[in-house]
Structure formats: C-alpha cells, structure tokens
Amino acid sequence: MTSTQRNETPVSDTPREPRIGILVVAYNAVTTLASVLDRIPQDFRNRVAEIIICDDASRDATHLVALGYQQTAPDLPITVIRHEKNLGYGGNQKAGYRLAIEHDLDIVVLLHGDGQYAPECLGDIVAPLVRGEADAVFGSRMMTEGAARRGGMPLYKYVGNKVLTRFENAVAGAELSEWHSGYRAYSTAALRSIAFDRNADGFNFDTQIILQLIEAGKRIVEVPIPTYYGDEVCYVNGLGYARDISRDVVRYRLGKMGFTSGEYGSVDAEYDLKEGEGSSHHRILEFLADLPPSKVLDLGCSSGLLSERVRALGHHVTGVDREAFPETLERVDEFVVGDLEDGIPSEVGTGFDVVIAADVLEHLRRPEDLLEAVKKVLKPDGRLVVSVPNFGHWYPRGRSVLGVFDYDQRGILDKTHYRFFTRKSLTRMLRNAGFEVRRHSEVGLPFDVLAGDGGSLGTRLLRRADRVSVSLRPTLFAYQFVLHLQRPAAPELLTRSVEEATEHAAASA
C-alpha cells in the first residue's frame, strides 16, 4: 500500500514552458532530505510543476521529514509518497516515473535524497530537454578531467567506474563518459516509448534504461556535474552491481546479434544476407555459380537479398514469400505472394532447374508438404538446395542440459521456428520425401555476426578452430547443413541403363 499527500497548484490557461518535475528518491534520508530540497535554486523553483518525493519504506523518519517540508513550503508543489514495502532503487524509480506520466509532466529529473548529487545543477540538467535537443540528459562526473577524484570519489570506485563504462560502451556501441551517474532527466515522452516497468528493481535499473534508450534511438546528452561524497550510506554491493550490469549489456549485445528474446536489443525484421566466406548463402551461391543460366525458384525469399546475388550469376529468379519488402520486386525477376504453409502457389509455374529453400523448412509446421509441392514444380533432373540449422549443435544442446532453453530472435533457436532438425532427422525426412543427397556441406558459427569484425586476429583464430571442430565432428559443431538434392532417376530409366550395360558387356566379350 502507498500513501500519498500532495500540494495542488492553480491551473493557468496561459501558454507554458514544459512541465518540469523532480523525482526525489529517498531511503533512510532523514538527515539529508531537507537540505537537498533547500538547495534547489530559487530561480529554478518557480519552473517546477511538481516535486515527487518517494520514500521507499525507510526505517527512519524520512517520511515525516518529507511531510514536514511539504507543510513549511506551501509554495512548492510537493507530492509525498511512502511505499509500505521497499521496492528497491529501480522499483522506486518506476513508481515515480509512472506518477510523472500520470500527472502530465513533460520532463522529470531524478534527484537523490542523500545529497550525493547537486540540486544546484538542475537548470543545466534540464536545459537540453527544454531546448528539444535531447530525450534524456545524464549528469557526468567524468567529463571534467580529475573532477571526480577532487570531489572525493574513492580510487577503487573511480577505477571501477572507468573500467565498467569502457566495457559498456564497447559492448553496447555507445560513447558515454559515464554509465553510473544517478543524476538524470528524461522526457516523459521518451519514458512512454520504452518498457521501463520491465526493468530490474535493483541498482542495475539505470543501466537497463540506458540500453532501452539506445535501442529506441533516443538522443542522450551528457552535462558535467560536480562530484560529492559525504557521509551518506552506500547500499550498493559493488561486485554484485558489476556482475548485473555486465550481464545486462552482454544480453543487449547478444540481442543485437539475434540471440536472446530481445528484451533490450533486437534485430531488424528483414533477414540479412549471410555474406561471410563459408556461410550457408556463400555455399549456395558457389553451387549456382557452376550452373549455366537456369530457372530458379527462391522459396521464402524475404527481401530478396539472396535472390539478387543469384540473378547476378545470370539466373532467372522467381521469389515467393508471404509479403514483399519494398526492395523485393527490384531484386527478383518475378514475385508471387504465397504462404508456404499452404504449399507453392500455382502462379509460380513449373519447370524449374533449381529450387532454393534456404532457412525455410524449419519455419513450417509441415515441411513434408512443401517438399511434395517442390517435386511438382521441379524438372525431373532439377536440383533442390536446402539449408537448415543444426539442432544438434553444442549451443542448443548446452542450453537444454543447463535447463536454460529458450527461444532467440535468430539462429538455431529462432522463435519463429516450428521444427528442429539434426542431420539424421533431416536426411530421413528428405529421403522419405523422395530426394537423394548429391552433395552436402557443413557451416560453422557465423562469426561475422557474432564478432562484428571478421578481420581481427581473435576472430580469425576462433573461425579456424571452429572449422577444424566442424570437420572433426559436424553433428556437434556444424551450425547449419547445406544439402544439394535430386530426385532419383525413374525405375524404367534405371532398368534401361542396366540392360544397356549388359548388352555392352556381352558385345565386349
């Protein structure tokens, strides 16, 4: 249960500046809260639409101090909240931001009730937001060289801050001078656009909201602030905090690569071309490069990136998918709308030399039905080219063994996959559908996606080790299988071939 008391301010019909709110998060701040409020600059006070003081179930008289200040400062629009249960640092912010949104504030500044951050800087913090230059503003203690240490930041915290910030920037692709300041201001429009309610209730909330802002493409501006370390009690477990934020940024990076379910980082809807040497698309294009100009059907062509490369080899390409991306029609010779769950649309026609099903079969509930349809559109001597992820790979095996199996946005555990295949189950399904494997190859991990820089020494060494592992035990280390298939020759042709061979042997005798 939460109790609320609020000072009301008169409503004016005159044009106004953005409604600025201050969220004061307080826990056991009985000795500091009043002085923090006193330090709000006089010329800033008349710009404040509301001050929300959130007492997070303090064990001292913080709530009473807040109520007393509310009574002695009737000119300030103060709302006092007391949580009956401690919500945590992140949980307290969530409650405050929800109120800021409900109370129709345009800007909300996060201010700590322990006095660690200077209220005198409030004007500087909100200025980029008022000017419309930012969606979030962070006060940074690291922008001015040496200021943090002069302000009393302990050496171990200074070093930890620098190391963690550098790590977070590298992994998340950001350029912030500091990730760990609690002095921040947000536009409530930006807060509405992100799912901050899903974030942790602990101190890593601040890191998670940065990741959400980056993912949403919001503008983050930093301004320098002074550093102050006094007698306030620190409730942060340093090692636990470092572990949590490191895990969060790694999850974000994995999300941007297609792994994880995408809580923080996500990939585009369009499937990218796998351009790396040895990738499944590279293997398919190598095969097609050896063929004369052919009639090719690309099933599940998505935006047509692979089709475009196939056309460049001199082939005539017909693409099929449920919908066309804007670029698709420019990348194929013909395009037919169709849901492959219902088979291949009749408008496609027949007589194809090659049918490509690249990363398609795993997306279907009944891939066997599609294989039957392929036989009807393929020439008797035509080729079917299939690429399928290997569920026997060590990654899904490991997650299953550890009990952390879940779907990803891309890759073997893509959340849109209905079927999973090992090499054995895949070849059995294809054989039962009437196809014979003429050529097969195994594809290793997509290091171009995982590492981002395929040319680094570390990436080259990992790629080499992966290739060796794939060659030694493909069922465990192959990330994908690429198969070239044909229908077996008709029985009468086989009989004729045997008879001709017998006659030829008799003539030779």
Image (cartoon, grey):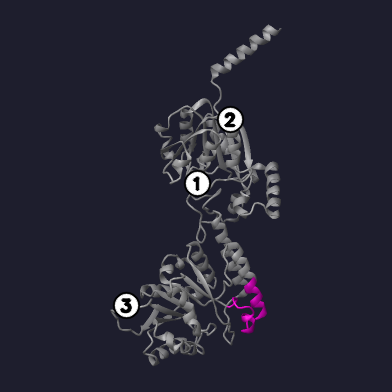
SS for callout 3: loop
Q: Mark 2 belongs to which amino acid?
A: Leu
Inspect the image, locate mark 1, and give the three-letter code of the amino acid beneath it: His
Q: Is residue 372 visible?
A: yes
| Residue plotted at (56% across, 40% down) | 387
Q: Nearer the viewer, residue 306 or 111?
A: 306
Q: Which residues are magenta?
A: 141-162
Left or right of 74: which side holds 357?
right
Residue 348, image quadrant: top left
Q: Are marks 3 and 2 in contact (CB under 8 Å)?
A: no
Sequence-wise first label, 1 or 2: 2
Q: Nearer the viewer, residue 162 or 373?
A: 162
Tag 1: Cα neighbours inside 10 Å, few (<14), some, or many (≥20)? Answer: many
Q: Which percent across, then down, holds residue 374? A: 48, 32
Q: Which residue is mark 1?
A: 417
Badge nearest the viewer, 1 or 2: 2
* Label 3 to label 2: alpha-carbon separation: 71 Å
Q: Is disc 2 placed on a helix, strand or loop?
A: loop
Tell me the number on the disc at residue 15: 3
Residue 288 screen position, x and y as percent: 58, 34
Label 3 crowd (10 A; few <14 / some 14-19 / many >=20) = few
Q: Which residue is mark 2?
A: 291
Front label number (3 vs 2): 3
User: Could you say which disc has been placed on residue 323 in the image?
Assistant: none
Tell me the element at label 1: loop
Residue drawn at (41%, 40%) of the image: 339
